[in-house]
Image (cartoon, rainbow, N blue to C red):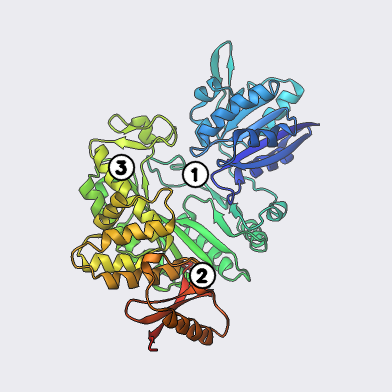
Amino acid sequence: MKKVVILAINAKYIHTSLSARVLAEGVSRYSKTAHEVIVIEANINQGFYDIADLVTAHNPVLVGISTYIWNAGMVTGLLKLFRSLMPETALVPGGPEAAHNAEYWLEAGADFVLQGEGEQSFPALLDALANKTSLNKIPGLCFKKDGLVFCNAEVKPSKSFITPDFESFSDELNGRIAYIETSRGCPFSCAYCLSGGSEVKFLPLETAKEQIRKLAESNAKVIKFTDRTFNCSPKRAYELFEYIIGLNTSRCFHFEAAADLFDGRTIELLATAPPGRIQFEIGLQSFFEPALKAVCRQTDLTRAEENIRALLSHQNIHIHIDLIAGLPLETLSDFKNSFERAYALNAHNLQLGFLKLLHGSKIREQNTSIVYSKEPPYEIISSPWLSTSDLKMIKQAEDALRNTYNKGRFLSTLRYIAGAAEIRPFALFQTIGEAAPAYGVPLKYYAEQIYILCRKLKGVDEAQLRECMIYDWFRAVKYGDLPDFLKTGTNEQFKKVIKTAEITLGRKIRRNEAAVLPSGKGIFADSESRDPVTGLYEVQFIGVINL
């Protein structure tokens, strides 16, 4: 029995790879020859030789590598390193980044590339290499022969799909994020996406429920569904939501959903979910309808807004909405309008992404006017509608948005500044991002830079600004010493705040959990009371501290 390694290189340690485990399950089900399969998970923050050591320790005859835009650059280097360390080992990248760019990967050092679903083609390749039989009939297999690239006929989509052994998967989670797939494919045909336009295959409901139950009993931090549009079948989604809401678990379940597909019955059901049980990631992408039409994005924007507001009104579900900057026809002015409309929804997270022209996407194949990076992640550089300077402004706004609002930081501060200075949200974030970029900056220094910038804005009262920032600091930062520029009051006042806080909470607190406000009031955080939806800590005020 020969050893085979399936290597997953995740974006972060906390992530886990579903695809690698599905391939391993495919080998156990469909291989006609016995193979010893080892799944190895690494992440992009590890060194090349550290990852190589994990793989070479098993002396495999073949290494299969899941490739995506976030790890493609590292995989290219690893192929060269693996070739020098294991000259006889077959190297086989697959996944979306390799599948749509096979010639590049074969030139980069791969022996084979697999296109399409690999649950059956991967074990077929292992069998063919082990038994030295023909490779010509393995669906989706690409290889070089006599200097030419050959690709076999693509994998025919099956009516069903397999899932890994969640019993053993659960044992490996250790507080990380677990992934589960209950449907595959997407009925929509967005030009920037690789999943669109395919027939949706569904896991049998009872099978899905059983797997959800197993993961709910694990110690995963979050259980993420990889279903591209989880609620594309509203009736089926309702039944699974109902099952998940009824579970006795503290796990959080994360779904990608289309807001306009929620019906009233489902929204009423979701209102009964325990706080923090469910998270939604909702891709709005834009509120500029010509841009949505240009990329074949179908969304009833009015209904989507209504449903998002309805979901948020019950304060029990974390809502994350997405916008994409750089869509065709959308100018900077149009994008600002989209941003303002999305921001006004008051979702917990507003992710601002940038158009990427992925290998295999319709927009890349059809594009003649958008300039984009030729290296992963193939992000837009400019277009007839957005100049490089326009995109720079959006990136500045995104930097501030990501490091403040989306992390639950300075929320009341942002509201106060926007109102007092009469500045629109996009302009506020762009101003902060330009004057105080956050990359590599300690949080205390970043907070001070925001303070220095915003206290100069017309209409902003410096004392009120400081009070907002102190309150926001205690809401978002556990046991974080208050920055010196925010400290005020006498030592005697501070001691009185600590004493009052401890009487109120009935326990001792740390010195960095309390402060005196410029108004003379006291403030303290309850580090044992955290909102399960927002993740923010409870903060209480004490009347003016008199001595």
Q: Tell me the mark number nearer the camera, choosing from 3 and 1.
A: 3
Q: Quadrant of the C terminus?
A: bottom left
> Farthest residue in the front direction?
491
Tag 2: residue type?
Answer: Pro
Residue 453: name its quadrant.
Answer: bottom left
Q: Which of pointers 3 and 2 lies earlier in the amino acid sequence?
A: 3
Q: Is mark 3 on a helix, strand or loop?
A: loop
Dot 3 and dot 2 residues touching (CB under 8 Å): no
Distance from the alpha carbon under mark 3 to that under mark 1: 28 Å
> Which mark identifies residue 314?
none
Out of 364 and 119, give the one closest to the viewer: 364
Residue lying furthest top:
146
The disc placed on residue 326 is: 3
Q: Please tell me the numbered disc located at residue 199.
A: 1
The local secondary structure at tag 2 comes to loop
The mark that comes first in sequence, 1 or 2, is 1
In this rendered view, identify the residue nearer to me: 262 or 541.
541
- Kind of residue sitting beneath label 1: Glu
From this view, report whether residue 44 is shown above or below residue 454. above
The residue pinned by badge 2 equals 532
Sort mark 1 into few (<14), some (14-19) or many (20+) by Cα contacts within 10 Å: some
Quarter location, residue 312: bottom left
Question: Which residue shows up at 32% across the image and 35% down it?
Answer: 381
**Is 335 drawn above or below residue 246 in the view shown?**
above
**Residue 537 drawn at (x, y percent):** 48, 72
On screen, 92 above or below 501?
above
CA distance for labels 1 and 2: 36 Å
Residue 267, visible in the rendered structure: no
Could you tell me if residue 504 is visible in this image? yes
The residue located at (58%, 82%) in the rendering is 507
Q: Label 2 crowding class (10 Å Cα cut-off): few <14, some 14-19, many 20+?
A: some
122 vs 520: above or below? above
